[in-house]
Image (cartoon, helix red, strand yellow):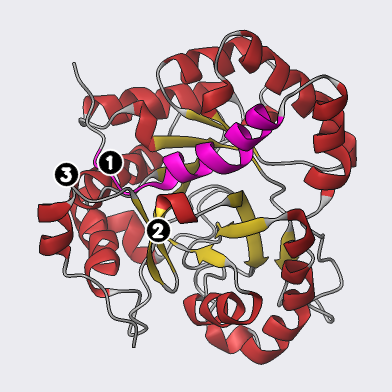
Amino acid sequence: MIKFLPLALLLATHAIARPQIMTVAGMIDAEDFGKSLIHEHILVDFIGAAETGYHRWDRAAAAKAMLPYLEELAPHGIQSFVECTPAYIGRDPILLKTLSDQSGLHIVTNTGYYGARQNKFLPEHAHTETADQLAARWTLEWTDGIEDTGIKPGFIKIGVDRGSLSDLHKKLVIAAAKTHLETGLTIASHTGPGPAALEQIELLKEHGVSPSAFIWVHAHNETDLSNHLEAAQQGAWISLDGIRFRSVERIFDQIENLRAHDHLDRILLSHDAGWYRPEEADPASKVRPYTDLFALLLPRLQEAGYTQNEIDQLLIRNPAKALTIQVRKHQK
């Protein structure tokens, strides 16, 4: 079992310690996180919370299928890989630890629950427990590890549906806020268009959490770029994590907009790729590689005159800062 610093010691020394990030193999210095992909998936199980479980896939087969895709990242200098699959939709910390050992990548997993897609992936207790009770569950994964693995989450992952937040999804956001204040883990929320993102930011502020602790996941789906600016101005992270052929120009324009307003330091880039799927006859048949960033978007940025320092801001400094373990309180 992996050994970790006791939480009390970690918090007591946090003010003088170097910034750190929790990976599936343990704590590392943020300066060692390196070039990173901030939002990807290894395995996702879409059957629903009531039926999912480790019986649904063969870990060894999944690791064998996905390792080549991770090994493709070495020539591009990728050192870290943030795996965003939540509990009850395919999170498997043992699989991730195996792949971290085999690939040499720093891999980060999460705590939290995913309410998007009309709550299909929420366990029954998420409907009945309070925000405090949910936060206690998620905090316990931080202090004691996930299940009996000893592996700890490096961020909080939640998900909400589009539009105005339901009471249930507000509860998930509040639980994430309470967990952040106990753990210092950053909150990444599957969101999409801006209204729900801005509503979540306000709710976090009401519960004492700075927007700088919030990652607006799938912000590339927003068409009103003023919402990107409003969220970035408040300090939130704008995750443009749907890089693929058909989205490159749109994401390039979104980066340009944020850069023009001096918000390059709030952007995160990734693919939302991978997806070994247990429900398929061949679970690896629909896997999408993690390479379009390097083949398509980076050349576009370089053609437009982006410097190496700016690219390092996007791929090295921003991800490390976003995932650094730090309680970030809202100053009213």
Q: Which residue is mark 2?
A: 154
165 above or below 138? Answer: above
Q: CA distance from mark 2 to mark 3?
A: 19 Å
Question: Residue 326 colored magenta?
Answer: yes
Secondary structure type for disc 3: loop
Secondary structure type for disc 1: helix
Q: CA distance from mark 3 to mark 1?
A: 21 Å
Q: Which residue is mark 3?
A: 15
Comes first in the chain, label 3 or label 1: 3
Label 2 CA crowd tier, 10 Å (few <14, some 14–19, many 20+) = many
Secondary structure type for disc 2: loop
Q: Position of residue 88 (x, y in %)?
A: 49, 68
Label 1 CA crowd tier, 10 Å (few <14, some 14–19, many 20+) = many
Comes first in the chain, label 2 or label 3: 3
Q: Residue at x 56, y 83 (%)?
A: 98
Q: Residue at x 10, y 54 (%)?
A: 12
Q: Residue at x 84, y 80 (%)?
A: 282
